[in-house]
């Protein structure tokens, strides 16, 4: 392999394949012309070794436990920024100035309301409808009520479009919860910031006003920041793939919501809570569940441990664990599931089976416990994930759209393993 090319030998023929390098040491072999030149394709189930695009948004090093947004360490952003600042950064590549952030927030206040006709949507979902199905459907419908949102240049550009979508999605999420429990809707307030508004819309009642606690607001900001983007995961790749067909932003985001809905993606922190509840109900029999997870003949797995990319401690999990301890201490809260989680983590961290397999706590392990402390029900956990991931989805969709050099509809290939060509058999001869 030369400095700029890799060689591939098929039979007696050798092919030169360009090597592409990223700014942080990433290396890839460019196979875009492989099929045309050789007649061969690559097979990569789950796309574990396939780079689908070039991107300047998020850098992830799974071996070292590094996660950066636009070159900034996730630890610094979670410590020093609000979610709206990070959303602006992800979209524009720079942290906002005071005036830019002020304008961004003002746009979110201005566009936080939904068209009143859309509110009737919530009346026609069954009471037990999944909040994610409501979110996906309603986000997709935004295009019909706000077609001008597609006209970026005529309507304020990407910043305004993003502000509108962030604000309206937050309103949709809170309204879906209120409708599910039969409570009157709480409209967004221009006096509250992004996270304060969401909490107030979720929990304020005419007979029991909600008291906003800064500790809860701080924790929610951190959780949304930590979920804001994560490279080419399942839902982000879905947003890009749908968008590559020319579908509008709202249809693409709706598809991302649906992808996130899966229990292996956005529903993982729900599964963690169920696991912890099972252990608690089973007299805290940790060894039983650890043994089940280690039994190769048992499909049971400990949820919240290990990650597709990280081969060490998920950097987001460290931040969430600390935030979890802080909010429980400051608010003087107790939750037996937090004690179960800490004990389980301690036991797993000392077990050679899990150590050898790099099964460390991931972002989902403690996030659900914090949401419980806030009063957010488990069926809303994936919605919270979607609220956080929205800036990343929008930035990825925009980056895909603006990449004129590589603009093409996504179309993976396959290796066909079905029947060879067969002769048609008339009905009367089929026995």
Image (cartoon, helix red, strand yellow):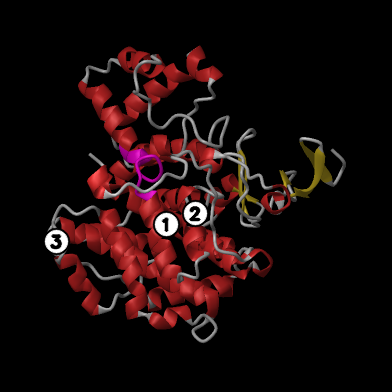
| Residue 119 on image: x %, y % | 21, 72
Q: Which of the two discs, 3 and 2, labels the residue nearer the N terminus?
A: 3
**84 relative position to 254: left or right:** right
Mark 1 sits on what residue? 256
Is residue 364 visible in the rendered structure shown here? Answer: yes
Q: Secondary structure at mark 1?
A: helix
Q: Is residue 374 above or below residue 391?
A: above
Mark 3 sits on what residue? 183
User: What label sits on residue 12 in the rendered view?
Assistant: none
Q: Kindly report the distance in space between the C-alpha atoms of the residues bearing marks 3 and 1.
A: 28 Å
Q: Which of the two discs, 1 and 2, labels the residue nearer the N terminus?
A: 2
**20 relative position to 58: left or right:** right
Query: In the picture, residue 388 is in which quadrant?
Result: bottom left
**Mark 2, other Cα within 10 Å: few <14 / some 14–19 / many ≥20:** many
Mark 2 sits on what residue? 236
Query: What secondary structure prevails in the magenta region?
Result: loop
Query: In the picture, residue 168 is in which quadrant?
Result: bottom left
| Residue 28 on image: x %, y % | 72, 45
In the rendered structure, which segment of residues is drawn in magenta? Answer: 260-270
């Amino acid at each position: 392999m030369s400095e700029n090319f890799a060689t591939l030998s098929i039979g007696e023929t050798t092919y030169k394949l360009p090597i592409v390098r990223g700014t942080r040491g990433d290396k890839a072999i460019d196979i875009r012309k492989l099929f045309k030149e050789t007649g061969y394709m690559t097979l990569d189930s789950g796309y574990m070794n396939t780079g689908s695009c070039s991107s300047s948004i998020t850098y992830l090093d799974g071996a070292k436990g590094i996660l950066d947004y636009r070159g900034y360490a996730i630890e610094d952003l979670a410590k020093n920024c609000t979610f709206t600042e990070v959303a602006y950064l992800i979209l524009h590549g720079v942290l906002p100035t005071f005036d830019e952030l002020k304008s961004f927030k003002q746009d979110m206040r201005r566009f936080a309301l939904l068209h009143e006709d859309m509110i009737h949507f919530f009346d026609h979902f069954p009471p037990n409808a999944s909040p994610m199905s409501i979110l996906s459907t309603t986000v997709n419908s935004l295009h019909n009520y706000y077609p001008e949102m597609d006209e970026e240049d005529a309507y304020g550009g990407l910043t305004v479009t993003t502000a509108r979508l962030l604000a309206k999605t937050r309103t949709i999420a809170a309204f879906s919860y209120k409708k599910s429990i039969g409570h009157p809707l709480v409209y967004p307030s221009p006096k509250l910031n992004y996270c304060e508004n969401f909490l107030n819309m979720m929990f304020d009642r005419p007979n029991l006003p909600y008291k906003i606690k800064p500790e809860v607001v701080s924790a929610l900001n951190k959780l949304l920041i930590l979920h804001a983007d994560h490279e080419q995961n399942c839902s982000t790749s879905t947003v890009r793939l749908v968008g590559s067909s020319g579908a509008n932003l709202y249809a693409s985001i709706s598809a991302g919501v649906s992808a996130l809905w899966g229990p292996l993606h956005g529903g993982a922190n729900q599964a963690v809570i169920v696991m912890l509840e099972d252990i608690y109900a089973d007299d805290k029999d940790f060894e039983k569940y650890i043994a089940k997870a280690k039994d190769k003949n048992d499909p049971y797995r400990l949820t919240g441990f290990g990650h597709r990319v990280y081969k060490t401690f998920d950097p987001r999990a460290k931040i969430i664990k600390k935030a979890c301890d802080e909010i429980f201490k400051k608010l003087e809260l107790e939750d037996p599931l937090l004690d179960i989680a800490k004990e389980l983590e301690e036991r797993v961290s000392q077990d050679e089976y899990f150590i050898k397999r790099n099964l460390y706590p991931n972002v989902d392990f403690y996030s659900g416990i914090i949401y419980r402390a806030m009063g957010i029900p488990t069926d809303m956990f994936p919605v919270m994930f979607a609220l956080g991931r929205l800036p990343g989805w929008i930035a990825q969709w925009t980056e895909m759209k603006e990449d004129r050099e590589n603009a093409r509809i996504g179309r993976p290939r396959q290796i066909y393993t079905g029947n060879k060509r067969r002769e048609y058999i008339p009905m009367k001869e089929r026995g």
